[in-house]
Amino acid sequence: DTAVSQTPKYLVTQMGNDKSIKCEQNLGHDTMYWYKQDSKKFLKIMFSYNNKELIINETVPNRFSPKSPDKAHLNLHINSLELGDSAVYFCASSQEGGSYEQYFGPGTRLTVT
Amino acid sequence: RKEVEQDPGPFNVPEGATVAFNCTYSNSASQSFFWYRQDCRKEPKLLMSVYSSGNEDGRFTAQLNRASQYISLLIRDSKLSDSATYLCVVNGGQNFVFGPGTRLSVLP
């Protein structure tokens, strides 16, 4: 059983398009996250979300928007894709609070051409 | 100063060697500390949490020095399978902050 799953695994698209990446966790966790890992391998948080609060990293462009239909899902929607958006995007989840480990999905490798 | 800094690496060591990774963090209010490992083209996975008193898990030992805002990871008797990037992670209350990682290659 996959604890945190993401689809698609690979996504190749052209500049200007709008795309979504889906994430699901079956761990019963309260908090989910989106991270971006760029070509230099630096992992940066984009959003964290539970049923009470969305915390946005202020450096994330508003072209990126998280959407959570329910506690087990946190999708990432990206408008007007740019070349610089090319990266690996990881979804993660954890129990609420900062003392608990995060479980990561396998990542979505986005390439914008 | 970056929030979490690590040895730049890469570290290339022979099998059986002992290797130590260092990490410093800037937020003195940080409460939770972790080491994750990330294999090439894979997701990060928890290696171990780091407790104030220090903790050990087999060949791995983690230490925390709150006064110096410093975390370490010691790997004894390195195996080929230990080759990966090791990420220091700190949580100051709102979000997890990942260090840039230190790459380890264990050579036969």
Image (tube, grey):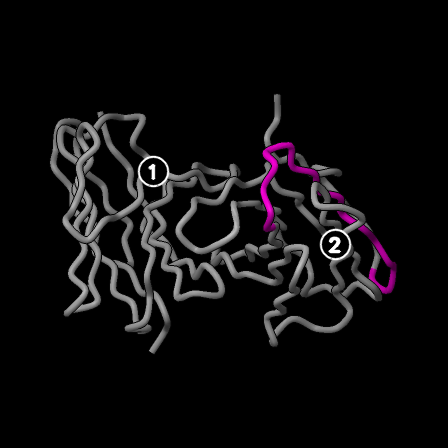
The residue identified by callout 2 is: A76
Q: CA distance from mark 1 to mark 2?
A: 27 Å
> In the image, which residues are magenta?
A15-31
Q: Secondary structure at mark 1?
A: strand
Q: Chain of mark 1?
A: B
- Discs 1 and 2 share one subunit: no
Cβ–Cβ under 8 Å for marks 1 and 2: no
**Which kind of residue does numbered mark 2 sit on?**
Leu
Q: Which mark is residue A6?
A: none
In the foreground, A97 or A18: A97
Q: Is B103 situated above or below A45?
A: above
Circle 1 residues within 10 Å: few <14, some 14–19, many ≥20: some
Q: Chain letter of disc 2?
A: A
Residue B25, quarter of the rendered image: bottom left
- Amino acid type at circle 1 is Leu
Instruction: From the image, tell me which residue sits under label 1.
Output: B47
- Identity of the residue drawn at 15% across and 61% down: B65
Tell me residue A89's x, y (percent).
Answer: 63, 50
Write the residue at 66% across / 45% down. A109
B82 lies left or right of A35: left
